[in-house]
Amino acid sequence: MKTGKELAGIVRKAVVETLRRKEPVEDGQKLGADLGAESIDRIDLTFRLEEAVGRVLDEKILFAEPDPTVAELVERLARMLEEKK
């Protein structure tokens, strides 16, 4: 099982790569409002996270709330991985 710090790194890296950002993302930034993620970006991000953790994730990781922050996404990922043990 990955630590919270490792999961945070995975999420940040996936967000940066998906959105083709040159600067790092911050925990409090919202995927849509602050980072400009659209629906297709969220789907791509889900695939990247699945690849990074080696598990199929529930799509609600990115769609349960309209606009999660990076930190909320890390928390959701941790919960999903814990549930699938």
Image (cartoon, grey):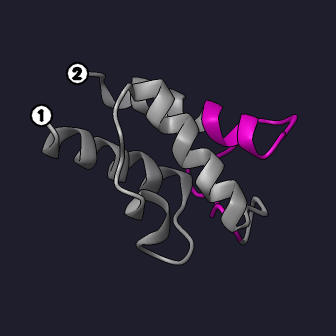
Main structural element of the magenta stretch: helix, strand or loop?
loop
On screen, residue 81 versus residue 12, left or right, reads: left
- Count the labels in the image: 2
The quarter of the picture where the N terminus appears is top left
User: Quick check: marks 2 and 1 in contact, CB under 8 Å?
Assistant: yes
- Specify the segment rendered in magenta: 13-32
Query: The residue under label 2 is which amino acid type?
Result: Met
Q: Name above or below for residue 1 compared with residue 12.
A: above
At x 45%, y 36%, the residue is 50
Q: Name above or below for residue 53 compared with residue 32.
A: above
Image x and y of residue 62, in percent? 49, 61
Query: The residue under label 1 is which amino acid type?
Result: Lys
Nearer to me, 49 or 13: 49
At x 57%, y 36%, the residue is 48
Image x and y of residue 79, in percent? 24, 48
The quarter of the picture where the C terminus appears is top left
**Dot placed on the residue nearer the N-terminal end, 2 or 1:** 2
On screen, residue 12 versus residue 49, left or right, reads: right
At x 41%, y 23%, the residue is 6
Image x and y of residue 77, in percent? 36, 45
